[in-house]
Amino acid sequence: MARQRWGRRIEFFLTTIGFSVGVGDLWRFPFLVMKNGGGAFLIPIVIFNILGAMPVVYLEMIMGQYSQSGAVSVWRVCPIFKDVGYGTVIATFLFSIYYAVIIGWMLLYFVYSLFPKLPWASCDNEWNIRETCIVDRVAAATSNVTANTSPANVTSVLTTLAPTFSTVLNNATFSYDVTLGKSETAAEQFFKYKALMLSEGLEVLGGVNWPMFGCLVAIEALCFFCIFKGVKLSGKVVYFTVLGPFVMLFIFLVRGSILPGAVDGIKYYITPDLRKLKDTKIWAEACMQVFRSIGPGFGAMITFASYNKLNNNCARDAVLVCLMDLLTGFTGGFVIFSVLGHVAYRSGLKISDFQQSGFSLGFIAYPEAANYLPPPQLWSALFFFMSVFLGIDSQFPNYEIVVTALKDEFPRLFQGKSTVMTLGVIMCAFLLAIPMVTEGGFYLLTLVDWYAATFSVTIFALIEVLVMSFIYGVRNIDQNVFEMTGQRVPIIFKFCWYCLTPLLLLVTLGFTVYTYTPPAYKGYVYKPWAVGLGWVIAATSLVPIPVCAIYALYTTPGTLLEKLQVNLRPNELWGPPADVREAESKHAQDRLPANEKSTITTPAFNTRL
């Protein structure tokens, strides 16, 4: 059966943009820029984007496009590492389980934004603890506090930064900092006691949060209808789900820029503090942000590129995807800080009082700020509508990665059953996500997020670069690209694959390990058995690599050296099918000089062994 193709090249480009540009670009990147020297932070971000992210994205696109296969079957290039593909699929599936719940929270907030009165705008709701509730930190600072707010609450509200909660959103880790003080804003209490219905801890899962359950069903159903017919359908869906959020982002940018005080917020955001560039931690954090934002190691670029025609220009797409991811995050900062500048202008607070990111920004700070943008329901609804679609753009590709891998590995088993298989994958993810929409589900989600993909995807990306550069060989990659497009790999990419990109991935992995702390949320400390469970989750995608490599060597006949030679060389299935090679690479050959055409008529199967 012929492999599906994107209807147009723009569909591949939009899908890759949708996967890499997630809510992390809107909720975390602006905070990092402000925290790490303003405009000066863009210097390491741009450097690592060019020397780190672009080479990995380009390499993954080449792997997928030349092999015409997904995240598992692509490892025919080096069979001993095939289980890196299985690990990638496992990590991606684990991520998709809880990411759907996070998008569900956004959908819930969107629904509540349509109410005549925003539920996080007051302390007189049934879920509020009125003795400790304040309307917002602006009201506290200006003494325009509700009758239920005590003076002690007012003095404590501005001390709101302490323990860390991290979550991966569109391949980015967010820090959620909350005080242990007694006072809480109405938005904080809505998030905890209404949206999450938060229990005392992981040991008390409690009952199902039915509104969130309904949102989870809606998100999973939407993902199914986006991909159940493969890329022929999903390629059309992205015209709306990717371009729509960009239109809304532009609307927010225009609206925010004309607000009083917006200029002060933008100045605070982009004013460079070059002194901070002396801090090596900032460079390490920039490196980590770039890789986690783009998402190498998840198998997405490999999977999407496998549906390209053989003569597609991967270099162009890789550069554009990385630049769009960078520009979107930077533009999102203008949106966020123009609004925060306006709130600071109206309240007399300093913009530094709003230094929050991740959940704290998306579900607490922004809903508070929306109260100052008439009409607040409109701007709150638009913000969460945009966030839902940014999340969906990153979520349904996760399922596509898993489905494609299964179809490629077991073609006879799943031939003609693509819809059923897609439904099965999404149903499995949905059932496993149900415990995360219970009253204690937030603690479970935090635990899974803390360990599921934090270490593994960086390791997978590092193995990809090392195997393709030093075992398969950059010379063979260059020949593959020449066969497909008639062009050579730019020398800057070759240099990065050999040296810089592996080094930057090692820095990212090392910084992740160095900054590791056990999971925690506010005053709740995870018990040893829960931390142990987290490490088991982390191991599920990593353990298969050595185990299956040993099995591959054991089952291969010959001496140890012969076993290694067989398993380190591409097997006979590596490369595009013969009919695809003849039909599509011929377009590249037609553009070549006559004396070069003969050099690309056979696949580059030889390695350096």
Image: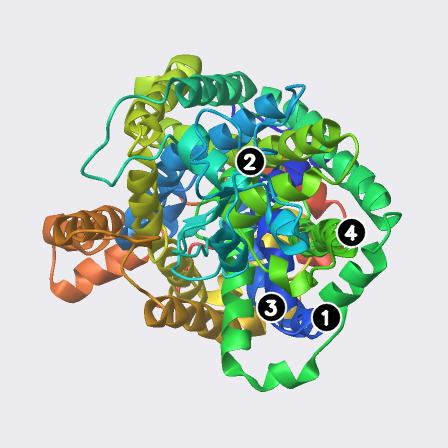
Mark 4 Cα-neighbour bin, 10 Å: few <14, some 14–19, many ≥20: some
**Height in image: 447 above or below 578?**
below
- Structural distance between the alpha carbons of marks 1 and 2: 27 Å
Which residue occupies 53% across, 28% down?
Answer: 124
Secondary structure under the numbered disc 2 in the rendered image: helix
Mark 1 Cα-neighbour bin, 10 Å: few <14, some 14–19, many ≥20: some
- At label 1, the amino acid type is Gly
Residue assigned mark 1: 39
Q: Nearer the viewer, residue 165 or 143?
A: 143
- At label 4, the amino acid type is Arg
Say whether residue 470 is visible. no
Secondary structure under the numbered disc 1 in the rendered image: helix
Q: Position of residue 280 (x, y in %)?
A: 51, 82
Residue assigned mark 2: 391
Which residue occupies 57% across, 25% down?
Answer: 231
Q: Is residue 526 left or right of residue 298?
A: left
User: Which of the 4 image quarters holds residue 382?
Assistant: top right
- At label 3, the amino acid type is Lys
Quarter holding the C terminus? bottom left
Residue assigned mark 3: 35
Secondary structure under the numbered disc 4 in the rendered image: helix
Mark 2 Cα-neighbour bin, 10 Å: few <14, some 14–19, many ≥20: many
Mark positioned earlier in the residue sequence (2 or 4): 4
- At label 2, the amino acid type is Gly
